Structures are given as structure tokens and as C-alpha cells.
Image (spheres, rainbow, N blue to C red):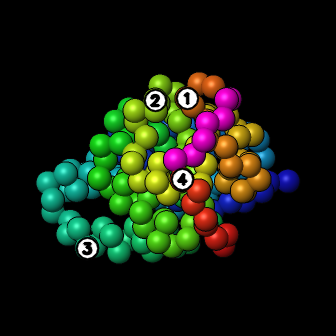
Amino acid sequence: MSKRRHVFISHHHADDDHVTKLTSLLGRNGFEIRNSSIRAKPSNQARLDAGKIPERTLKRLLRMKMSWAGAVVVLIGKDTYKRPWVDWEIRKAKELGKRIVGVYTHGGTKADIPPALEKYGSTLVNWNSDSIIDAIEGKDSPFEDPGSSTAREPVHAAPTSRC
């Protein structure tokens, strides 16, 4: 029997393939992930890059999509820490009281962690289905270093609510 979870996957558009890999990984382990995040088609991405979509429109759309999710998963890949929209999504998730789960993609490093995730994240785990599922469900809240199951101390202790 499949377990359905509604999540918002915050990611840099260059990491779109990791979104698909994450939902497939969790699907193979009995979880149906309903992702409400935005994955722009190339033509829409060009409009976004050219600034043809007003920022307030994007924020409204992201807020609506995030409100529906029970948790926000932040994919941490190369240069994620530089992405202003990822940072905004993490801050909005905190404002909405969402559980914020950081997941290192293969090759993600501590240097790639967005500052807002260090400040507001609920947990930070490696690319491991059991760890990710437990983190989404709030069963475990470790802060792991990339490539290691060794827990580290979180930078903060962020209280969150469950929807």
C-alpha cells in the first residue's frame, strides 16, 4: 500500500533531474510523493530568466503551492546556497510553520547549504530513502554531514508545527 505525502521540493532549476530521482527513490519504497513545487518548462524558464514574470506573481504562486504541502524538502546541490529563490522558499516555509527537510544531492556539500536552511531547517539528511522518509514524517531530526551518517549539532533549534 502506498503512503501519500504532500511536499514542496525547493530546488535550483538546474537540479530538476534530482526532483524526479527523489520522487522515484521514495516511490520505490512505498511512498507516493505529491510535489507542489514549480518545474519550469524551457520556454517558461526563459521568461523567468528574462524577468518577464513579476516577482509578486511568483511569490503568490509559490506561497499557494507551499501552503498545500505538509513539509518542504530542500535539495542541496552545487551552489544551492547562492539561489535567492531557494532562500526565499525556506523563509516562507518557516513563516508558514512547515517542517523543513534539507537533503544533500549526490555531490552536495556543507558549503552548498543555504543560510536560511541552517537557520530554520528542521533536519538535514543524506540521500537515503529511510532517512528522508523519517525526516519528512518528523520521526527523526538529525543534522548530518554530507556522505556521513554522523549527526552534527544543528545551528539552531527551530520549532515547527505539523499540518
Specify the amino acid type for callout 2.
Answer: Thr
Q: What stretch is highlighted in magenta?
A: 149-155
* Cα separation between marks 1 and 3: 35 Å
* Cα separation between marks 1 and 2: 6 Å
* Cα separation between marks 4 and 3: 30 Å
Task: Rate crowding at label 3 as few (under 14), some (14 to 19) or many (20 or more) other CA atoms within 10 Å.
Answer: few
* Cα separation between marks 2 and 3: 31 Å
Asked if disc 2 and disc 3 are in contact, CB closer than 8 Å, the reply is no
Q: Looking at the image, can residue 111 be seen?
A: yes
Q: Does the magenta stretch include residue 153?
A: yes
> Element under label 1?
loop
> Element under label 4?
loop
Residue under the image location 47 percent in, 25 percent down: 107
Q: Name the residue under label 3.
A: 56
Of the residues under marks 2 and 3, which one precedes in the sequence?
Answer: 3
Specify the amino acid type for callout 4.
Answer: His
- Image coordinates of residue 41 in percent, x first then y, are 33, 51
Of the residues under marks 4 and 3, which one precedes in the sequence?
Answer: 3
- Image coordinates of residue 149 in percent, x first then y, are 68, 29
Of the residues under marks 4 and 1, which one precedes in the sequence?
Answer: 1
Horizontal side of 48 relative to 74 (left or right) equals: left
Q: Mark 2 points at which residue?
A: 109
Q: Mark 4 points at which residue?
A: 156
> Element under label 3?
helix
